[in-house]
Image (cartoon, rainbow, N blue to C red):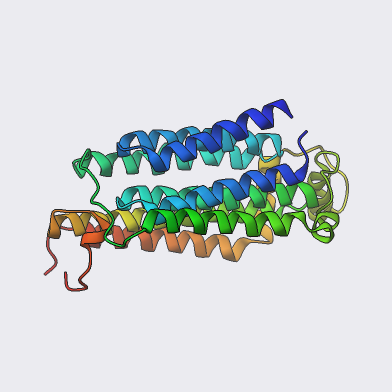
Amino acid sequence: MAPLSYYFILSALLFTVGTVGVLIRKNPLIVFMSIELMLNAANLSFASFARAQNLMAGQVIAFFVIAIAAAEVVVGLAIILSIYRTRQSVDVDDLNVLKG
Amino acid sequence: MVLFLLLAIVSVAASIAMITARNSIHSALFLVVNFFCLSVLYLTLNAEFLAAVQIVVYAGAIMVLFLFVITLLNPGREESSDRLTGQRPIAFALGLALLAEIALLLSQSSLRERLGTFPPAAPFLEQVQSKISGQPTAPVGNVQAVGIELFTTYLLPFEIVSLVLLLAVIGAVVLAKRQLR
């Protein structure tokens, strides 16, 4: 079995890739996917902590994170859809006015 | 160890491919590859319930929703060029800085001592059991252990999460309606 620190290194790598994805992409769907990637990286850390400390809490929190991520995706995609309906574009650089 | 390295390489490669792919459908499919790798990693961490939830909720429900919205929004459009000059190099520099910070944190010996290494598998199942019944019973699986924790210690957060999901559904319906009057 790989040592605990390897899991944290992998988690850090995935989180960094997610962060860079949020920063460089213009398509809000891919920005959302990068956020999902970051949540997954955090979940991996929670699961490894749960395994290392023999606590169930890490797995339960990871489960909560997954549930909240589902709620967040539903609302976010609905917002993207309604933006597309009013502006015919989903490029994040075009979204520079607050008025709908 | 070999399994971990294989999964790590595949998942990092899939995530990099996800943020660089031109086509958003390809990005979504690379993300699914990444989710499957993470699911197997959860199995190696004795988190069978999380592995199943990862497949069912993420790869099953969330990614189908993503693919549905991508096909609805007419993909294949080129992204506009950077409006902020030098956005890409700055983003890469900031990402590298973040990685360096985490690496610095992990390399500190005090943290590593506190984290330690993996103990032998699955004594926490017995912990949960003895908390419930006070006496050793038949061995329970990971799903049962998660369920027991979820419905005793974390009952209030569990109910709050169900409320949050309900609110998200209502919000999505309101936002996606054709016109509000």
Q: Position of residue B36 (x, y in %)?
A: 53, 33
Q: Quadrant of the N terminus of chain B?
A: top right
Q: Residue furthest right?
A: B135
- Please, is residue B152 above or below residue B54 in the view? below
Q: Position of residue A46 (x, y in %)?
A: 66, 52
- In the displayed structure image, the side of residue B129 where residue B7 appears, left or right: left
Number of numbered discs on residues = 0
- In the displayed structure image, the side of residue B100 where residue B92 appears, left or right: left
Residue in view at x 48 percent, y 35 percent: B14
One can see residue B151 in this view: no
Residue in view at x 71 percent, y 39 percent: B45
The residue closer to the viewer here, A95 or A80, is A95
The residue closer to the viewer here, A15 or B63, is A15
Residue in view at x 11 percent, y 70 percent: B181
- In the displayed structure image, the side of residue B159 where residue B141 appears, left or right: right
Q: Residue furthest bottom?
A: A99
Tell me which corner region of the image, top left, top right, bottom left or bottom right, holds residue B168. Answer: bottom left
One can see residue B24 in this view: yes
Q: Position of residue B172 (x, y in %)?
A: 29, 58
Q: Position of residue B4 (x, y in %)?
A: 68, 32
- In the displayed structure image, the side of residue B27 where residue A90 appears, left or right: left
Tell me which corner region of the image, top left, top right, bottom left or bottom right, holds residue B12. Answer: top right
